[in-house]
Structure formats: C-alpha cells, structure tokens
Amino acid sequence: SQTIHQWPATLVQPVGSPLSLECTVEGTSNPNLYWYRQAAGRGLQLLFYSVGIGQISSEVPQNLSASRPQDRQFILSSKKLLLSDSGFYLCAWGRQYPNEKLFFGSGTQLSVL
Amino acid sequence: AQSVAQPEDQVNVAEGNPLTVKCTYSVSGNPYLFWYVQYPNRGLQFLLKYITGDNLVKGSYGFEAEFNKSQTSFHLKKPSALVSDSALYFCAVRDMRTNAGKSTFGDGTTLTVKP
C-alpha cells in the first residue's frame, strides 16, 4: 500500500531563518506531487506541483521554492522566512494516471516569529 | 480557470438528523469532483468522488453526494449525522482535461453535529 510521510509536524522558526520541509511517498512510482498551504484552518492554496524529477511548477509568486531531487521526494524550502509564511503546509500525491484523488500527508504547522 | 464555492462557513445539525454541505463549481471542461474531510491538525482524507456515470455517488462513512450538471453543484449529504462527523469538509474540482491533476479547493465548511 502507498503511504506519504511529511515532517516535521510542528516547526517554530525566527524571521529570516531558512526552511526545509520534506515529504516522501512510498509504495508507488512517478507520482504527481503537490505542496499546499492552509491558512487559519480554512482553504487550501496550491503552492507547487511536480509531474517528475526536477520538474517544478509554481502556482503563486512567493518567498518559497520547491525541489524534487528523487522520484518520491518533494522538498519545500525558503532562504529567509517571513512572518507571512506561517501556516499549515500539506504535501499530497496523486497518480499520473488515472489522475484522480489526492492523498495528503499529516501536515506541518509552521510558526514564524 | 476553475473554482469552487462553499457558501456556508458553518453547518450545525443535531445527531440523527440529515445533513447537507453545499458546493458549487466552475470549470471549462468536464469536471472531476471530490469531497475531503479534515480533522484538527491533520491532513485531508478522501471521502468520495464523481468522475462519470451515476449522478449520485456513495463514499466513506455513509456519505454521498449528488452531481447536478445544470446547477453546477455537488452537495455532500448524509441521511443521519453522527457526532463523530464533526470536522472541516472541503469540496474540490479539477478539469478532466488537465494532466497535472491540479485540484482547486473550496474554503471549507465546518460541520458541527450536536448530541
């Protein structure tokens, strides 16, 4: 069966510090990978998605970047965090085909102080 | 472009009563439609989907949803609510033609079921 791991669960970082959130998927190959941000327990905003190694599409301009160094690894990064980067970050994967539902990680609560 | 509207931030029902959580969508092509549920400080869990076929789809935990193309709606329903159904519910849409599978989510509806 497939599983998705996302860590850390909670992170408190000072403004201006770097960020690295990691997400890995097991039990499948060549997944579509996604990073979403959820503000204040409400709607999800798609930040990045990837259809293959090294292929990253950004949905909104921001202080964050994403990388996919391996097929089932997706990393969200920042060189210098801003207060506005605080939020709940969710990694998700979906099959390339059939291209249907998403499977979500358990999320990372990021607080930038 | 695609979008989802969940017109109610909050839905309150008594245990044992039927519940409905509303969702309307906009998409250029034919839609894939989904409902997800989120419990506090957790990721989203898939409930059900409409891809094609019967307009009434059944999912996990006794939930069902009805696809209405003319009204561009996909309301989530359950005949008898449980206290344990209390959670945040998200509707999502994706254009069937999109290979990357980018889903657009609504802002969520908080369902509270009272004993």
Image: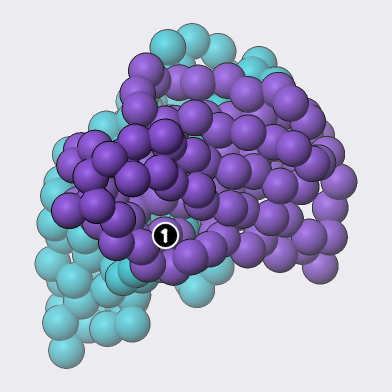
Q: Is residue B64 visible?
A: no
* Residue neighbourhood size for the residue with mark 1, other residues' Cα within 10 Å, grouped as few (<14), some (14–19), many (≥20): many
Position of residue A63 in the picture relative to residue B100 (left or right): left
The residue positioned 40% from the left and 44% from the top of the image is A18
Which of B64/A35 is in front? A35
Question: Which picture quadrant has residue A10?
Answer: bottom left
The residue positioned 57% from the left and 38% from the top of the image is A34
Which of B41/B85 is in front? B41
Position of residue B85 in the picture relative to residue B50 (left or right): left
Position of residue B58 in the picture relative to residue A26 (left or right): left
Vertical arrangement, residue B11 with respect to residue A90, above or below: below
Question: Which picture quadrant has residue B25?
Answer: top left
Assign a secondary structure to mark 1. Answer: strand
Q: Quadrant of the N terminus of chain A?
A: bottom right
The residue positioned 13% from the left and 56% from the top of the image is B10
Furthest-front residue in this view: A17
Residue type at mark 1?
Thr
Position of residue B2 measured from the top left corner of the image (x, y, whole percent): 42, 19
Chain letter of the residue beneath label 1 in the structure image: A
Q: How many marks?
A: 1
Position of residue A65 measured from the top left corner of the image (x, y, whole percent): 49, 30
Question: Which picture quadrant has residue B53?
Answer: top right
Position of residue B111 measured from the top left corner of the image (x, y, whole percent): 23, 64
Furthest-bottom residue in this view: B115
Q: Is residue A56 visible?
A: yes
The residue wearing badge 1 is A108
> What is the drawing colour of chain A?
purple
> What is the drawing colour of chain B?
cyan
Position of residue B115 in the picture relative to residue B35 (left or right): left
Position of residue B19 measured from the top left corner of the image (x, y, whole percent): 27, 64
The residue positioned 74% from the left and 26% from the top of the image is A54
Which of A86/A20 is in front? A20
